Amino acid sequence: MKKKFFKLLAKLNNLILPSYTKQGLDLSKASKLQLAIFGWKLYVTKNALD
């Protein structure tokens, strides 16, 4: 159940949130909001793959 939820959430993230890796964002120069979005997407992806 948990894995299915995170897989669905990962698909929604890909549709809604921007992809900073494709944009070539430098994490040392990223704003707090960009870092929060990046961290959220990383957390969801990690849990979807477990």
Image: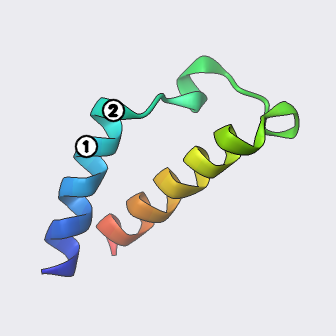
The image position of residue 7, as x and y in percent, is 22, 59
Instruction: Answer with the quarter of the image where residue 8 lies.
Output: bottom left
Disc ID at residue 16: 2
Q: For mark 1, what is the residue?
A: 12
Say whether marks 2 and 1 touch (CB < 8 Å).
Answer: yes
Q: Residue at x 47, y 28 (%)?
A: 18
Residue furthest bottom in the image: 1
Label 1 crowding class (10 Å Cα cut-off): few <14, some 14-19, many 20+?
few
Q: Is residue 7 above or below residue 2?
A: above
Quadrant placement of the C terminus:
bottom left
Q: Residue at x 34, y 43 (%)?
A: 13
**In whole angstroms, how far apart are the C-alphas of marks 2 and 1?**
6 Å
Instruction: Answer with the quarter of the image where residue 28 lies.
Output: top right
Instruction: Answer with the quarter of the image where residue 20 lies.
Output: top right
Q: Residue at x 71, y 26 (%)?
A: 25
Q: Amino acid at mark 2?
A: Ile
The image position of residue 21, as x and y in percent, is 58, 30
Seen in the image, is 23 located left or right of residue 19?
right
Q: Is residue 36 above or below residue 30?
A: below
